[in-house]
Image (cartoon, rainbow, N blue to C red):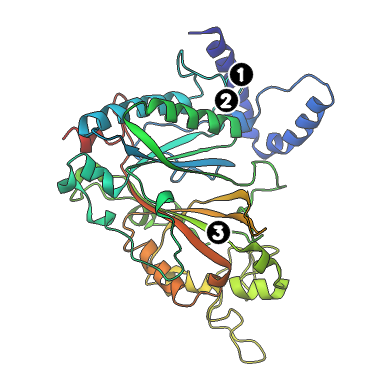
């Protein structure tokens, strides 16, 4: 074991006892940063750095893991001539690497040193297979029907060069350097087997930035994620994860990820008054509560009318149209990142949402909801879908195994 690894493990061990204090240490992070900037000695590793997520398990990490503050989405295409054998070797390399990275350990002689001073910082690395992966590996007989292409939607203006891909990797962490370190390691480990197709970089609110735990806001300023299914709901697992008894056993305990790059037309949105914005969404901007009253978690009274006889939550409000009860119970676990890629040639911000949603079956999750939104969502004039992908994300790997082993070695 190297001196650096010993030092990092001591830091992690010392910080482990601090993890139980949660918000107290999280809130102290800002003060610690100020003291360091003032010339005082830096403080020990905080809860943000010390929090780790296990790589090995029934499900892959990065699905039900709490949202992290930094994220990278990247796809690869297998190199010409690479097939099933090369794909298996690559997935073994990547899985071993992800296990080390998520444990906060250096990755060997080729480690860049970018994350040497940090703990795991809730790093997760998640792997998925696109539809074309099965053609290139001659495994089309084992391709699930759930990977059939998504239908076209009227709001789509998709860039084929930034859509789909053979292999998809989702990286999330609560420290930007830790996330970049993982991204660079994954890219290097691809070697000659696969080539990057597209990459998107995102962010969320940092832990400890608010006085109490809160649902994150998107770049429109809206609280985003209130209606997500909760793990303690009795049907959560069957909605989000593929059952153990399934036609394609290699997908047991896995999930399907729909990825969409949704540009927000922020200049147009910000011209609306606060009241207009709230009518588009159907919720108060201040606290995310439905326009019919209560708190963020209050069920909206969709039938309630105001003194003028009109519905308090308009018929085309985004929150109404996307609600599971308005879509035959269709539900998906939304786990997005915001993005900002600078200012476009026309002077408008290239910013929005890297939408990632998880479900046991996209035809019962994403598709029916998006079809309904496509037909009359009040939010549609203010967003543009510019890239899309659908990926089969196998269940987690056990110790000594790699993600996708059941597919590639059967």
3 relative position to 258: left or right: right
Q: Position of residue 35 (x, y in %)?
A: 81, 27
Question: Are circles 2 and 1 on residues that touch, CB within 8 Å?
Answer: yes
In this rendering, which labeled residue sits more in front, label 2 or label 3? 3
Crowdedness near tag 1: few (<14), some (14–19) or many (≥20) residues, C-alpha within 10 Å = some
Relative vertical location of residue 64 with respect to residue 300 in this rendering, above or below: above
Element at badge 2? loop
The residue positioned farthest toward the front in the image shown? 345
In this rendering, which labeled residue sits more in front, label 2 or label 1? 2
Q: Position of residue 66 (x, y in %)?
A: 52, 44
Q: Which residue is mark 3?
A: 263
Element at badge 1? helix
Q: Which residue is mark 1?
A: 11
Q: Which residue is mark 2?
A: 119
What numbered label is drawn on residue 357? Answer: none
- Mark pair 2, 1: CA separation: 8 Å
Question: Are circles 1 and 3 on residues that touch, CB within 8 Å?
Answer: no
Element at badge 3? strand
Q: Closest to the observer: 371 or 334?
A: 371
Could one spot residue 373 in this view of the protein? yes
């Amino acid at each position: 074991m190297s001196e650096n690894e010993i030092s990092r493990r001591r830091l992690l061990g010392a910080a482990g006892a601090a993890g139980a204090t949660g918000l107290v240490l999280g809130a102290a992070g800002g003060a610690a940063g100020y003291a360091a900037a003032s010339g005082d000695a830096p403080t020990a590793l905080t809860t943000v750095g010390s929090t780790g997520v296990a790589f090995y398990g029934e499900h892959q990490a990065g699905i039900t893991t709490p949202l992290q503050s930094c994220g990278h989405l990247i796809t690869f295409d297998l190199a010409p001539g690479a097939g099933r054998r090369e794909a298996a070797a690559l997935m073994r390399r990547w899985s071993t690497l992800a296990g080390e990275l998520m444990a906060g350990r250096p990755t060997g002689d080729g480690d860049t040193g970018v994350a040497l001073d940090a703990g795991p910082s809730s790093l997760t690395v998640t792997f998925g297979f696109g539809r074309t992966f099965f053609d290139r590996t001659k495994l089309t007989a084992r391709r699930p029907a759930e990977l059939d292409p998504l239908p076209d939607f009227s709001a789509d203006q998709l860039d084929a060069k930034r859509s789909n891909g053979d292999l998809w990797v989702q990286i999330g962490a609560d420290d930007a350097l830790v996330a970049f370190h993982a991204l660079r390691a994954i890219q290097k480990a691809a070697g000659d087997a696969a080539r990057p197709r597209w990459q998107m970089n995102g962010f969320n609110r940092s832990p400890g930035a608010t006085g109490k735990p809160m649902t994150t806001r998107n770049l429109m300023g809206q609280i985003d994620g209130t209606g997500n299914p909760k793990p303690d709901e009795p049907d959560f697992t069957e909605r989000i994860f593929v059952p153990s008894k399934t036609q394609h056993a290699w997908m047991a305990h896995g999930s399907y990820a729909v990825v969409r790059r949704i540009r927000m037309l922020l200049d147009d949105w910000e011209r609306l008054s606060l009241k207009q914005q709230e009518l588009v969404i159907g919720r108060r901007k201040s606290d995310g509560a439905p326009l019919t009253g209560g708190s963020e978690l209050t069920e909206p009274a969709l039938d309630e009318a105001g003194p003028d006889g009109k519905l308090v939550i308009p018929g085309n409000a985004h929150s109404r149209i996307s609600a599971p009860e308005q879509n035959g119970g269709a539900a998906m676990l939304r786990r997005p990142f915001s993005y900002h890629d600078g200012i476009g040639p026309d002077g408008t911000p290239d910013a929005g949402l890297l939408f990632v949603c998880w479900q046991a079956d996209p035809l019962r999750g994403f598709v029916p909801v998006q079809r309904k939104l496509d037909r009359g969502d009040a939010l549609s004039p203010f967003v543009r879908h510019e890239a899309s992908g659908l990926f089969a994300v196998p269940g987690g790997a056990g110790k000594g195994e790699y993600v996708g082993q059941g597919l590639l070695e059967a």
